[in-house]
Image (cartoon, rainbow, N blue to C red):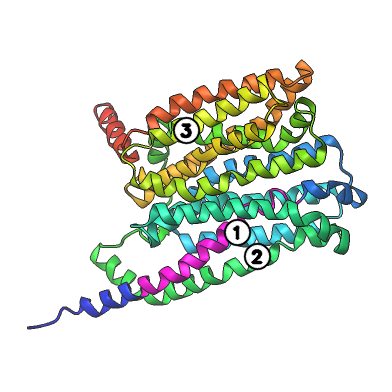
Amino acid sequence: MSTSPDLPRRASAASARAGGRALALVGIVLVAVNLRTAVAALSPIFSQISVDVSLDSVGVGLLGTLPPLCFAVFGLLAPALRRHLRLETLLITALGAILIGHLTRGLAPNYAVLALASVLTFAGMGVANVVLPPVVKKYFPASIGPITSMYVTIMALFSLIPPLVAVPIADSLGWRVSVSMWAALAAVAIIPWLSLWMRDRRATSAAMRAAAASGALTDDDVLPEISSAVVGRVWRSPLAWSMGLLFGTTSLNVYAAFAWLPELLTDLAGVSPAQAGILLSLYAGMGIPFSLAVPILASRMRSVSPLIALGFACFAAGYLGLLLAPAALPWIWVALIGAGPLTFPLVLVLVGLRSRTPEGTVALSGFTQGVGYALGALGPLLVGVLHDLSKGWTAPLVFLLVTLVVIAVAGRVVARPRMLEDDWRRTARDEAPQR
């Protein structure tokens, strides 16, 4: 019996892919470590930075809105950066931008350089945000829930570290070291992806040429350029819009809390600034167990409606507690509000679970995070404006309560077991008679 000449090549490719998964797992962990380090690295040490770089309240506010804005803009741009760009190449580029951004922020001689370097840093993070879901689907198609759970939990953990260590390091080594030291993490994270990229090129070049010659070239290893037709279909997809609105409303509430919760608690609950800082840490820490559990639960549940309802209920109970009895049990209200964003890891895992193809995963990831972070950027601004206009916190809290209506409505659509590509086919059928 003859042996197909393709069998050795297929066996070699399968072995390479299996070996690459371990390296990819390390790479995913290291990327997750880098995705939030820059967000909270500056705010604890603005007083030290202002000695060398002129900072006013407007400048500080602009720096605070840059993360969600950059995540939105570059999340939407990520799928169109280059035609048929490998996922590994795009991650290396994103990590390189983060690395250079950290170093430049630490060396910034003035505000303009500090702001531009921050844009570069958050641009890299925004691209990596979008690329991670398709990377998980590529290397771990049967374990999307557990792997997403892992990297979202790591993101949550490493969002706590910069504000804890920024002040001590700035006091002992200077603010420039405190800001730029995070570049070391980005440099380490590049190593596994560079290794995967080099091995992938060596192992697949011959196979890709053969597949191209036979017309069997696949897109498993690339981030496909999303055509204008696909972009139009995504923008008309009820599922994509619902996921974007759910993610965006969650982000709006999260960024508003990070910006204003300490001051709100000081004014309403009568806590000291130190206690308000501890409560803010409680708020951030509540996301860790949910980041670990929600993606796994979502991947096993027939309907994610109970998870969305739980997030809605926690948000509502926490805000009502702050409105009606803020000084009674402030730590309970903060813990409840901190549990509300369980919809954040839920949407991230649904990006993979609500799409069938690599193109669909990339399109849904970019759209969801682009729209979501754009809405998130409005949170601190709108809460601040309402606080200034009303001279109190009732109007901002009522506004945040009203935003929960969006979570309820969008959540109903997201909870339905449907795929993005189903909307594509429906749109294509609707468009067919017009051609």
Task: Please say whether residue 33 is one of the residues in the magenta stretch.
Answer: yes
The residue tagged 1 is 33
Q: Is residue 43 visible?
A: yes
The residue tagged 2 is 185
Given the image, on which type of amino acid does mark 1 rest? Val
The disc placed on residue 174 is none
225 or 188, nearer to the observer: 188
SS state under label 2: helix
Given the image, on which type of amino acid does mark 3 rest? Leu
Given the image, on which type of amino acid does mark 2 rest? Leu
In space, the residues marked 1 and 2 are separated at their CA atoms by 8 Å
Residue 79 screen position, x and y as percent: 48, 49
Residue that extends furthest to the left in the rendered view of this protein: 1
Residue lying at 65% horizontally and 31% vertically, measured from the top left: 379
136 or 217, nearer to the observer: 136
Looking at the picture, does residue 396 appear above or below residue 334? Answer: above
Give the mark nearer the N terminus: 3 vs 1: 1
The nearer-to-camera label among 3 and 1 is 3
Q: Are marks 1 and 2 in contact (CB under 8 Å)?
A: yes
The magenta region covers 16-41
Residue 269 screen position, x and y as percent: 75, 28
Residue that extends furthest to the top in the rendered view of this protein: 390
The disc placed on residue 310 is 3
Residue 169 screen position, x and y as percent: 82, 61
